Image: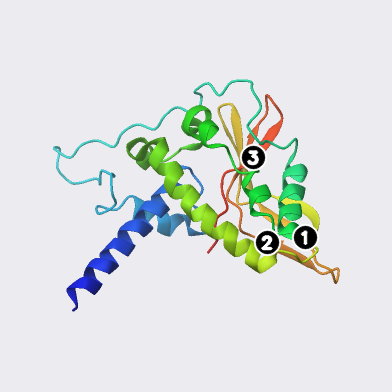
């Protein structure tokens, strides 16, 4: 085998493991959850301690408590309801406006500071840390945002519903997992779009933001 090709494949697998670990760390593996978790927690995943049969194996670090203080301030860029968030996403798609679509994603400062302990529910999060998880997660989010505009932008979609598959309370925030964006197109046909990661709700301020844009399946 060509050594360069082998090294390139290794780098690709390394990058895929990091990206999978980033979303698993934030509890948003979605439809790929089982496969992503296996990748993220495998012996070769970066920064992850794999369990072993000997007593000398280091223990997995504890996960930050979801009860860590988030505070009362509204989430930066937050919308007042799930419907308002869904409408903003549809408006951004119809306008092909990447900046508007990025504006509904969780703020970097909020994520790394106030929210990381609450939304991170996997042992790999403690070792990766908020900066690396944010960087990897938003890299994939930016790619998926561009693809979503290409697929669905400028089509005159009408918002119907933002429908999460599950709701999970984590300390001072609520995670609305695997939300489906239900719209109607110009012909009146209903479409269900699945390119959103979890929605983060902050009940104290009544604000909602999107964790990221994320491919499913």
| Mark 2 lies on residue | 193
Residue mark closest to the camera, 2 vs 3:
3
Residue drawn at x 57%, y 37% is 107
The residue pinned by badge 1 equals 183
Residue 165: in sight, yes or no? no
The quarter of the image holding the N terminus is bottom left
Instruction: Please provide percent x and percent y for residue 153.
Output: 70, 64
Question: Residue 97 location in percent, x, y?
Answer: 69, 55
Q: Quadrant of residue 34?
A: bottom left
Spatial separation of the CA atoms under disc 2 and disc 1: 8 Å
Name the residue tied to disc 3.
209
- For the residues labelled 2 and 3, the Cα–Cα distance comes to 18 Å
In this view, the residue in front, 195 or 54, is 195
First along the sequence among labels 2 and 3? 2
Placement of 215 over or under 124, stated as above or below: below
Under tag 3, what secondary structure? strand
């Amino acid at each position: 085998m060509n050594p360069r090709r082998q090294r390139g494949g290794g780098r690709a697998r390394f990058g895929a493991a990091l990206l999978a670990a980033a979303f698993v760390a934030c509890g948003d593996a979605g439809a790929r959850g089982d496969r992503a978790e296996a990748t993220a927690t495998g012996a070769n995943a970066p920064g992850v301690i794999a369990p072993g049969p000997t007593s000398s194996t280091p223990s997995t670090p504890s996960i930050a408590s979801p009860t860590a203080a988030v505070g009362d301030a509204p989430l930066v860029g937050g919308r007042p309801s799930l419907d308002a968030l869904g409408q903003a996403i549809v408006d951004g798609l119809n306008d092909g406006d990447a900046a508007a679509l990025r504006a509904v994603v969780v703020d970097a400062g909020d994520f790394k500071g106030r929210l990381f302990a609450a939304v991170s529910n996997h042992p790999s999060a403690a070792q990766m840390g908020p900066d690396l998880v944010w960087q990897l997660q938003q890299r994939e989010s930016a790619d998926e945002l561009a693809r979503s505009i290409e697929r669905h932008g400028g089509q005159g979609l009408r918002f119907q519903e933002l429908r999460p598959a599950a709701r999970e309370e984590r300390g001072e925030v609520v995670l609305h997992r695997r939300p489906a964006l239900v719209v109607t197109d110009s012909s009146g046909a209903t479409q269900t779009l699945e390119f959103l990661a979890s929605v983060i709700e902050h009940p104290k301020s009544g604000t909602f933001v999107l964790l990221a844009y994320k491919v499913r399946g």
